[in-house]
Amino acid sequence: MKDKEKIADTEVRHLDSATARHLDSAESDNESEEKHRPMLRNANIDYSHGTFFVTIQAAFNKTIFGAIVGEKSILNELGEAVAESLRSLGERYPGTEVVEFVVMPNHVHAILRLARRRENRKHQLGYVVGRFKGWIAKVYRDMVVQGQAVDVGTTPWQRDYWDKLVTTEEQLAAYRRYIRNNPAKWTRDRFGAVTSYSFGNVALLNARLVGFVASQGAYKSDLKPRLLWVRDMAGTEARHPEFDAAAAHHPELGAVAARHPSHVEVAGLRAREKAPLISTFTSAQERTVFAKALSSGRRFVKICPGGIPAESELEPVIISACNEGRGLLISPVPTGTGINKQRSVWCNEYVLKNAAEVWAGEITPGHTLDSLVKALRPRKSGSNTSQP
């Protein structure tokens, strides 16, 4: 039995990369290529009944259904609509059972079991999936008009879908495990610790950090910082577990801390010295805040989702701040890796989780940052408007 389970799990792992290839090949904006798109259905399979593992991808692979926080999929309003539609699929289409499903930020996995019925169409699976996609497309368009969903075009879906016929109990169990573990694997399999690479004073991670976040697309002229929340960290040292791990792999960090002891003593910080800012500083409003911090000499922790830039690409003021112990650049990936949307979300999650005080500029409803903030907001939060 164990051998069969291993074989089934291996099939599912191979399926993940195969799914991406098939879905990518099925997406084309060139009408002349439409008739040449590969057919994803297998002519040797009877789609009128059976158990199928189905994957449906969001348009352009966009993260429009929510965000992964920790190891859970936190859905926005559109994502919740997708989940509710899947829960009620059997009520709308008799003979259809949704055995298991998960709604991820940019795709859906579901195991659909279609009973053998005379009323079923020849391609019953396609009929059910098509109706499901069509209904969500309508919900999506209404939400876009109301400003509650990310606008990715006329439909939230990539063309077609990917399916796999499930023929054994071992396969079924493997697909169910795959679905249940999908949120946990989202970040665990993709990214390392945000502090894996660093330049500057790592001891700043011990300070009572002030986070700042704002959505991409927000105009810097509309910046009105507001306090989202303050975590009660009185009497505790704001040491992050990653600092110890980073220090273990980088012995030189101890020397950095020794050169800047005043930045290690969290409780003894001088009243006139503001707490360090932490952010990815990538959106227009975040960059505005960062520029102000640099000009005032304020300490900062800048997270670089695409890798820490080469020193030749850094502004002299940033290099000086890092060398003098007032600044820190950290990243989960090496220099030159490049920006990745999911990694950026991972880095924003780090900001929201590790800042004792969080401020925000404009946050677009329904976007990923909005989902992160709602998921990580403490029970007690502030709403003042001032300066971080």
Image: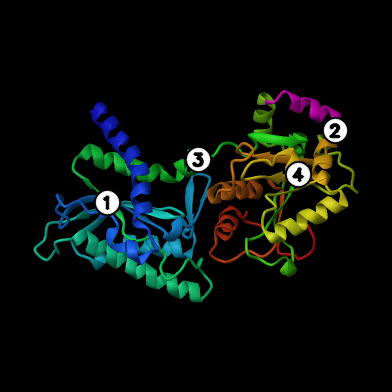
Query: Is disc 1 placed on a helix, strand or loop?
Result: strand
Numbered badge on residue 190? 3
Query: Is disc 3 placed on a helix, strand or loop?
Result: loop
Residue at image mark 2:
260
| Residue density around tag 1, few if under 14, some if 14–19, many if 20 or more, within 10 Å | many
Residue positioned 38% across, 69% down in the render: 137
Tell whether 184 sits left or right of 214: left
Q: Earlier in the sequence, mark 3 or mark 1?
A: 1
Q: Is residue 360 visible?
A: no
Residue stretch in magenta: 250-262
Percent position (x, y) of residue 209? 74, 46
Spot the residue most to the front: 32
Residue positioned 83% across, 27% down in the render: 258
Q: Earlier in the sequence, mark 1 or mark 2?
A: 1
Tell whether 5 sits left or right of 257: left
- For badge 3, the amino acid type reads Arg
Residue at image mark 4:
314
Which residue is nearer to you in this view: 249 or 381?
A: 249
Residue at image mark 1:
163
- For badge 1, the amino acid type reads Asp
Q: Is residue 231 visible?
A: yes
Q: CA distance from mark 2 to mark 4?
A: 22 Å
Image quadrant for the C terminus? bottom right
Tell whether 294 sits left or right of 9: right
- Given this view, does label 2 or label 3 mark the residue nearer the observer? 3
Per the picture, the main secondary structure of the magenta-coloured stretch is helix
Residue positioned 85% across, 32% down in the render: 261
Q: CA distance from mark 4 to mark 3?
A: 27 Å
Which residue is nearer to you in this view: 111 or 156?
A: 156
Q: Earlier in the sequence, mark 2 or mark 4?
A: 2
